[in-house]
Image (tube, rainbow, N blue to C red):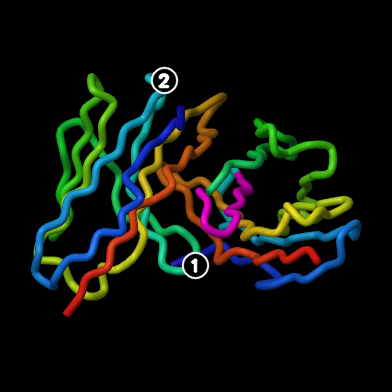
Amino acid sequence: EPEVTQTPSHQVTQMGQEVILRCVPISNHLYFYWYRQILGQKVEFLVSFYNNEISEKSEIFDDQFSVERPDGSNFTLKIRSTKLEDSAMYFCATQGIDTQYFGPGTRLTVL
Amino acid sequence: RKEVEQDPGPFNVPEGATVAFNCTYSNSASQSFFWYRQDCRKEPKLLMSVYSSGNEDGRFTAQLNRASQYISLLIRDSKLSDSATYLCVVSRGSAGNNRKLIWGLGTSLAVNP
């Protein structure tokens, strides 16, 4: 069964550093998403991406965040200058016919 | 008010018990409804979609009441492996097939031997 993959599984960074989280979507899917989950809190929508542009973004997705699909394969989330409160699990998801399929997540720890 | 509300639990039940989870959503524009399961520190996995006609998958039954904006999940004959957090999720679309998922906090279930 095809699956969404994410790298790295765990990223530790210093506050103010840039991080790039990577996702390889399921190959024939067209809509891609990033969600995050702060420990003990609910999953939150960050951004959706279609046809090489952002379709929708949440209030969380401010100017520090960006997404791109640089090579037609990877789908990346960049956080330009990380803050302590960016520490969370970041999940990539892709849209099938009726369902979103999630990657295993990247645990980001900002020190 | 939270857009998707669930009782966080925890629900502690013995093996073989029947347990019911409830969820309400506030936005009547919500289009699709799901129950996801999340094990500790893992990604959410789709358990089942929820339809107004009700749907059943083995020991799991889900129901949607659009008028009341209420979603339920019933687990019969619970197993130890059912221990997890159950997430109530609604989706709204914008253009095309784009769907944004809105999540409840989840209800924690522990099934005890």
Letter of the chain that mark 1 sits on in the rendering: B
Callouts 2 and 1 in the same chain: yes
Mark 1 sits on what residue?
B42
Where's residue A27, x and y in %? 59, 57
The residue lying toward the viewer, choosing from B41 and B93, is B41
The residue lying toward the viewer, choosing from B96 and B18, is B18
Residue B23 lies in magenta, yes or no? no
Image quarter in which the C terminus of chain A is found: bottom right
Mark 2 is on which residue type? Ala
Where's residue B22, x and y in %? 25, 42
Mark 1 is on which residue type? Lys
In percent of the image, x 64 and y 57: which residue is there?
A90
Letter of the chain that mark 2 sits on in the rendering: B
Mark 2 sits on what residue?
B29
In percent of the image, x 56 and y 24: which residue is there?
B95
Give me the disc on residue A106.
Answer: none
Residue B33, picture quadrant: top left
What secondary structure is found at the residue carrying circle 2? loop
Residue A12, picture quadrant: bottom right
In percent of the image, x 28 and y 26: which residue is there?
B69
Vertical relation: A84 (above or below) A49? below
How packed is label 2: few (under 14 Cα within 10 Å), some, or many (20 or more)? few
Q: Would you say B41 lies left or right of A16 here?
A: left
